[in-house]
Image: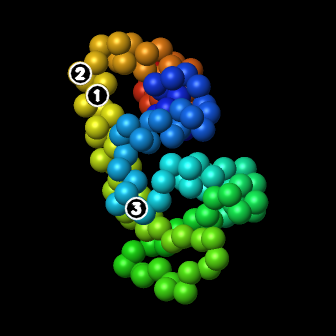
Amino acid sequence: DTMAFLVTGNNSSKDFKEWLNKYVDLSIVGINTDELWEHRNALLHMTTLDSRKVRQGKIVRLFPYKEPAEFPRDLLNNSKFYSIDNLWHALTEGFDKFVKDIESNEELKRVIESNWKKIVYDEPTVLVKS
């Protein structure tokens, strides 16, 4: 969400998916942007694995697992398992591509600097001793 917001100034499924499609290779995770968007919605808004589209059977339910454990072989109907480690690896490679894109594109750099000022973040402070 934040990376897409930095580029567009918006927070929509379209922006989220476009940023992922441009910078992140989800094929190593075995999931796609629609599935990840719905997984994000379920976790963020409902603290479950089932978004509205998952409950409607329009998108598969994603089950994260942590390696080195293997995912269960008896897959549940309309569900898919994915490795958190593989997702993290794909995202970190995407962040690296994103940074390189920013460094080589002055217009993108200006847009990101403008949008950065709109987000909430923890800026380190310096204690001044009297």
> Which percent across, then down, holds residue 114?
47, 14
Q: Is residue 121 visible?
A: no
Q: Residue furthest front?
A: 58
Query: Label 2, on which residue?
Result: 104
| CA distance separating discs 2 and 1 | 5 Å
- For image coordinates 43% across by 27% down, the residue present is 126
Residue 76 lies in quadrant: bottom right
Q: Amino acid at mark 3?
A: Val
Please give left or right for residue 22 compared with residue 118 in the image.
left
Judge by depth and name the residue closer to the eye, 42 or 117.
42
| CA distance separating discs 3 and 1 | 23 Å
Residue 21 lies in quadrant: top left
> Which percent across, then down, holds residue 110?
39, 13
Query: Label 3, on which residue?
Result: 29
Secondary structure type for disc 2: helix
Please give left or right for residue 111 compared with residue 92 in the image.
right
Pointer 2 and pointer 1: residues touching (CB < 8 Å)?
A: yes
- For image coordinates 47% across by 68% down, the residue present is 82
- For image coordinates 60% across by 38% down, the residue present is 13
Please give left or right for residue 117 compared with residue 102 in the image.
right
Q: Is residue 10 above or below residue 47?
A: above
Query: Label 1, on which residue?
Result: 101
Front tag of 3 and 1? 3
Q: Is residue 112 above or below residue 65?
A: above
Label 2, residues with CA under 10 Å away: few <14, some 14-19, many ≥20? few
Secondary structure type for disc 1: helix
Judge by depth and name the residue closer to the eye, 21 or 57.
57
